């Protein structure tokens, strides 16, 4: 397993981030939640004063007394509710002997839809009144509001609990008899907002007191503050509990989710590792449409192109290596060829030069000597001419400039004719030639070139004849081929020399004496002729001597007749 896997790192990062977030949330709650809570409540207190004071200012500008306005709005509110047609029914559904849904005159009262419409209008009018504004803050923000006429000391309006106590407290604050330990949060020329802890109820409040713009109406507003510290502790506990559950669940989920991501990456890593070892048979087999899928398909294409390119490079390298080896071999062959040709031509040229100089200087005074000198010169020139012709023939065969002309002929008849024409040579070599064909054997080949193969084999046999001095030629059909053997008694060829017999100018006689009269080209011509016929040739040491052979394509007697 990978020590620092992406899956583990992502999971650890997620756990660390979630832990840091939980700690930061708890720290922020502990340090700033209480202040934020108080600031929000303070803003509500300021907004309450501004809105109520705006309503008061409107009536003051109209020349009305706030006490009269409040009396009028409260009376109007009662009238609106009582005139809406809503009666309080008794237990039996009647009030003062009338049926529910009828007035005292027996006229049906307003239907529910009419009552609902009137009630909506009533609510709209009440919300837009001074009393409605005060009641709205009292209901929605839990603010207790007390209004006191500073001239008479009468309480004009009370919204909330302990109105008498709050009215007295407002008067004490105005007279400078408030609690000195209160924390002043905001202070203007019109009002002061303080934070107060009430020892009676062991609770904290925001208290605002001062005068409205008429400079006659004293107000006091009180808003309870929850135990924010306990709320912070509870909030932190709840956040921690929920956060830990989310952390555990999220970590497990993250582990399995990242597994879906890391598994393809691990697969791609193994593929790339095998590709680095030049194994391009691997492929990414996932057809996902995401980035990893695109990467996998790109790696497949890369692998395919690398395989093709490397195969081409290997092939080119192999061909280059082959060309280099062939060039080295050709260079070596050229060096050997030059050396061998030089060696082969050196002796006849020296003889020709020597005997020609002898004739020029008059060393051969009698006719017999002159004839001898001329015969040597002619013989050596003929040998040089023969070697040059052989080299030309071999070169033409090796470079494909002398293609065989195929025909069907009797190989046994060709062997017989060759032995008849070479009978004088065999007699000179004191050779006993054995050849007893049983029946005609027809082959398809170039008759002229096959005659040259037989001539080279026969000359090679006569040059190396020894012992009983027997030359035995035999032929036989083997399947769809005809094989011909040429055997001569004599010494065996060293096994290490057999593979090199078909090389130009190669001689088993390392001293390269002229005892056999051969140039070392004949067997090379045999090999080249058999190659252009796409046939085989060879040699083997057998009891008493050496046997060369070659094979040809056999044909039926009818086709060769």
Image (cartoon, rainbow, N blue to C red):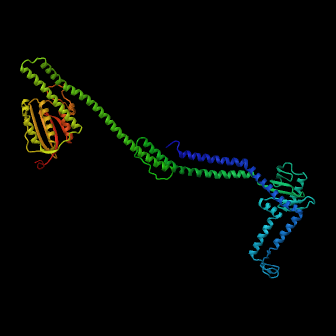
Residue 320, horizontal then vertical, whole percent: 34, 37
In the image, residue 396 sits, relative to residue 517, either above or below, namely: below
On the question of residue 510 being in view, the answer is: no
x then y, percent, for residue 334: 26, 30
The image position of residue 26, as x and y in percent, is: 68, 48
Q: Residue at x 14, y 47 (%)?
A: 555
| Residue 28 located left or right of residue 416 | right
Q: Please tell me which residue is depicted at 80% across the width and 67% down the height of the picture.
A: 125
266 vs 430, nearest the viewer: 430
Residue 490, above or below 229: above
Count of numbered circles on the image: 0
Pick the residue in front: 380 or 232: 380
Residue furthest out toward the right:
152
- Asked if one can make out residue 251 in the rendered structure from this viewpoint, the answer is yes
- In the image, residue 223 lies at what x, y percent? 80, 56
Q: Quadrant of residue 405?
A: top left
369 left or right of 263 in image: left
Q: Residue 63 falls in which quadrant of the image?
A: bottom right
Would you place residue 75 above or below residue 496 in this image?
A: below
């Amino acid at each position: 397993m990978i020590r620092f896997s992406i899956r583990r790192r992502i999971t650890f990062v997620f756990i660390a981030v979630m832990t840091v977030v939980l700690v930061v949330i708890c720290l922020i709650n502990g340090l700033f939640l209480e202040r934020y809570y108080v600031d929000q409540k303070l803003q509500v207190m300021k907004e309450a004063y501004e809105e109520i004071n705006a309503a008061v200012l409107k009536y003051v500008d109209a020349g009305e007394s706030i006490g009269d306005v409040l009396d009028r709005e409260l009376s109007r509110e009662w009238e609106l509710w009582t005139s809406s047609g809503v009666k309080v029914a008794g237990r039996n559904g009647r009030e003062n002997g009338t049926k529910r849904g009828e007035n005292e005159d027996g006229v049906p009262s307003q239907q529910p839809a009419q009552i609902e419409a009137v009630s909506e209008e009533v609510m709209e009018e009440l919300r837009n009144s001074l009393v409605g504004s005060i009641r709205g803050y009292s209901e929605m923000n839990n603010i207790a509001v007390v209004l006191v006429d500073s001239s008479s000391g009468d309480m004009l309006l009370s919204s909330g609990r302990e109105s008498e106590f709050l009215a007295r407290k407002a008067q004490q604050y105005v007279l400078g008899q408030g609690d000195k330990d209160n924390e002043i949060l905001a202070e203007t020329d019109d009002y002061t907002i303080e934070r107060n802890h009430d020892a009676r109820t062991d609770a904290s409040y925001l208290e605002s007191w001062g005068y409205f713009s008429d400079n006659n109406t004293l107000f006091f507003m009180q808003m309870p503050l929850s135990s924010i510290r306990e709320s912070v502790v509870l909030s932190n506990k709840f956040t921690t509990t929920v956060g830990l559950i989310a952390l555990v669940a999220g970590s497990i989920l993250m582990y399995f989710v990242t597994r879906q991501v890391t598994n393809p990456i691990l697969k791609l890593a193994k593929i790339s590792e095998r590709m680095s070892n030049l194994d391009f048979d691997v492929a990414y087999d996932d057809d996902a449409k995401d980035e990893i899928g695109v990467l996998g398909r790109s790696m497949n294409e890369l692998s395919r192109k690398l395989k093709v390119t490397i195969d081409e490079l290997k092939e080119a390298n192999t061909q280059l290596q082959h060309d280099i080896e062939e060039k080295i071999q050709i260079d070596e062959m050229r060096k050997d060829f030059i050396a061998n040709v030089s060696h082969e031509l050196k002796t006849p040229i020296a003889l020709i030069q020597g005997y020609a100089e002898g004739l020029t200087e008059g060393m051969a005074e009698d006719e017999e000597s002159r004839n001898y000198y001329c015969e040597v010169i002619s013989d050596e020139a003929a040998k040089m001419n023969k070697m040059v012709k052989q080299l030309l023939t071999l070169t033409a065969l090796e470079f494909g400039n002398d293609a065989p002309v195929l025909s069907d002929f009797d190989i046994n008849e060709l062997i017989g004719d060759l032995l008849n024409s070479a009978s004088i040579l065999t007699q000179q070599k004191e050779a006993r030639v054995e050849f007893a064909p049983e029946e005609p054997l027809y082959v398809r080949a170039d008759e002229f070139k096959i005659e040259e193969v037989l001539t080279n084999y026969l000359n090679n046999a006569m040059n190396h004849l020894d012992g009983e001095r027997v030359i035995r030629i035999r032929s036989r059909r083997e399947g769809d081929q005809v094989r011909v053997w040429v055997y001569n008694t004599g010494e065996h060829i060293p096994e290490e020399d057999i593979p090199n017999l078909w090389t130009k100018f190669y001689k088993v006689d390392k001293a390269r004496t002229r005892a056999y009269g051969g140039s070392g080209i004949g067997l090379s011509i045999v090999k080249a002729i058999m190659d252009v016929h796409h046939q085989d040739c060879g040699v083997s040491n057998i009891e008493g001597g050496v046997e060369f052979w070659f094979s040809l394509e056999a044909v039926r007697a009818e086709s060769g007749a």
